Image (cartoon, helix red, strand yellow):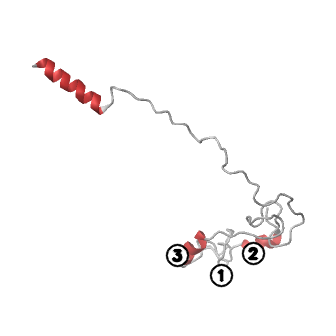
Amino acid sequence: MYSEAALLQRKCTGINKDGSPCRAFALWGSNDQKCRRHTKDTKQQRLITVTKTVCHCNAYAWPHRPGSGLCRWPEQPAQRSTTPAGTHKRPRNRPPRFVTVFSFDSRRDPLEKLERWLDEQRSNQ
């Protein structure tokens, strides 16, 4: 969860059409601290969207998302993780999202259909 200081840095400074302040988060790396809707330049939107912002604070021994877990971005972390970098198991053994079962039906096979049709034509002659 973001702290108050992080929320102030991430908040969009744009104004909606009805005059109310925008409540969305600003794009990472945006110079004018605007969200996607209030950023005028589409090239800037694409460039900002492609780059992923990572934090290199002392909360973890590896690059991580800002404000996640023990990280208190933009402030210094209160705790430090004792897990060393590079201890993640590869590959992850995740169950498949869905299992596709392939079944072969000889009645639908085009070659089988052709052979049956040819046999019928030969028998009719």
Mark 1 vs mark 2, CA separation in Å? 12 Å
Q: Residue at coordinates 59% horizontally, 42% vertically from top-left?
A: 97
Residue, far right: 78
From the image, tell me which residue sits under label 3: 42
- Left or right, 3 with reference to 92: right
Q: Nearer the viewer, residue 65 or 110?
A: 110
From the image, tell me which residue sits under label 2: 9
Please tell me whether residue 121 is drawn above or below residue 90 in the rendered image: above
Please tell me whether residue 106 is drawn above or below residue 16 in the rendered image: above
Specify few, some or many for label 2: CA neighbours under 10 Å numbering under 14, 14-19, or 20 or more: some
Please tell me whether residue 39 is drawn above or below residue 72 in the rendered image: below
Q: Nearer the viewer, residue 20 or 46?
A: 46
Query: As shown in the figure, which amino acid type bears the numbered disc 1?
Result: Asn
Q: Residue at coordinates 52% horizontally, 76% vertically from top-left?
A: 42
| C-beta proximity under 8 Å, tags 2 and 3 | no
Q: Quadrant of the N terminus?
A: bottom right
User: Dot 3: what SS?
Assistant: helix
Q: Nearer the viewer, residue 117 or 76?
A: 117
Specify few, some or many for label 1: CA neighbours under 10 Å numbering under 14, 14-19, or 20 or more: few
Image quadrant assignment for residue 51: bottom right
Residue 21: % across, % down: 68, 74
- Left or right, 79 with reference to 117: right
Q: Nearer the viewer, residue 80 or 17?
A: 80
Considering only order in the chain, which callout, 3 or 2, is on the residue closer to the N terminus?
2
Mark 1 vs mark 3, CA separation in Å? 14 Å
Residue 35: % across, % down: 63, 72
Residue 9: % across, % down: 75, 75
From the image, tell me which residue sits under label 1: 31
Residue 122: % across, % down: 14, 21
User: Dot 1: what SS?
Assistant: loop
Residue, far top: 123
